[in-house]
Image (spheres, helix red, strand yellow):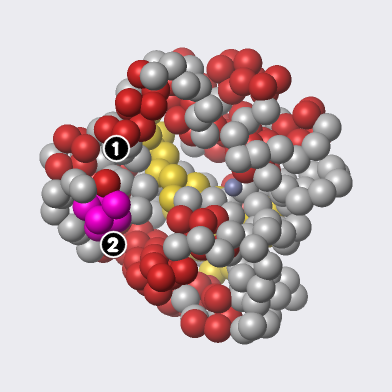
Amino acid sequence: MIFIDGVGIGEKDADKNPFVKFGFKTFENFFGAIPHKNNSILKNHPYYLFPVDPVMGVEGLPQSGTGQVSIFCGINAQKFVGKHFGPFPYSTTIPIIEKQNILKHFKKNGKKVFFANAYPQIFFDYLNSGKKRLSVTSLSCRLSDIRLNNATDVREGRALTAEMTNSRWNKKLKYNLKVISPKTAARRLLRITSRNDFTLYEFFLTDHLGHGRIQDEFDDIYKNLDEFLFTILSEIDLENLTLIICSDHGNFEDISVKKHTTNPALTITTGKYAKQLFENISNLSDIKPSIVKYCK
Ligand SMILES: [Zn+2]
């Protein structure tokens, strides 16, 4: 599972939608088109691209805290909380994360579970300081006794930085890691995936870009993401693996506004149970139960 924060299916308007403006070879090569609101289901078996409802009957703009609990725990968290909330999980959803996040589900069933992201030392310092505001994924790991990878794991090829190539860690955090291409990062993720029953990787720079941050890095991040996803879809073992790429809400697909959008979340499935996931997922809370049902 690749979770990409803040990517929806937007309008066919190059002034708003970077996918329309710049093209995206992952979409073009595997689906023959750039998805947009009037062409939001693209099927090319075993590749499926489709919209998923992140609003879920709750007024307002979808947010990461509730949206991600809906994805990873299989509930309508926005309805449970009574509003969209983020970026961190709402307090009353933390016991739900502890009890029923998807990583814990697979772990409890004796499966090998791996969260492929690595965290920099500054994050572990934050944890050790007693602060507890964590994203849904890192909190899911903490509450399920799943180890969080560090810089050594990146160096030794066992994990990926959230930005894939390591160049931001070097630039912003003064690491001296080997910079890898998005293609190498994708191959590393596929290798990790082949050794585990359930693997999760999270990419969130799309949401930062959608909020209008780090615009000087837009071109690099955009190209890297496309190359990374293209390599994953090109080289994945389609017979034995199932892949879902999903998001929690729109944002990046409309850069004319710096806020999240109410657009449907972008979802792609491929591999063994791609069709079943496509047929069973219509809102964020369908993602976990559908994975659990088919990918045993
Ligand atoms: Zn988000």
Image location of residue 53, percent across then percent down: 73, 51
Image position, residue 145 (x, y; %): 39, 16
Where residue 160 sits, quadrant-wise, is top left
What amino acid is found at the position of numbered circle 1 in the picture? Pro
Disc 1: which residue: 120
Task: Give the residue drawn at x 62%, y 84%.
Answer: 14
Tell me if residue 261 comes above or below residue 151 in the rendering: below
Q: Is residue 257 above or below residue 202?
A: below
Identify residue for label 2.
Answer: 182
Spatial CA span between label 1 and label 2: 19 Å
Whether residue 242 is visible, yes or no, is: no
Q: Residue at x 21, y 48 (%)?
A: 174
Q: Is residue 122 magenta?
A: no
In the picture, measured across the screen, residue 56 lies left or right of residue 260, that is right
Taking depth in this image into account, of 290 and 121 the one nearest to the observer is 121
Q: Is residue 114 left or right of residue 259?
A: left
Local SS, label 2: helix
Q: Which residues are magenta?
A: 167-172
Q: Is residue 169 magenta?
A: yes
Which residue corresponds to the image point at 21% horizontal and 37% vertical from the top-left? 151
Q: Disc 1 or 2, which lies upstream in sequence?
A: 1
Circle 1 SS class? loop
Q: Residue 250: horizontal and vertical position, in percent?
A: 65, 58
Q: Nearer the viewer, residue 61 or 241?
A: 61
The residue lying toward the viewer, choosing from 219 and 148, is 219
- Residue 60, position as x, y percentages in the image: 82, 49
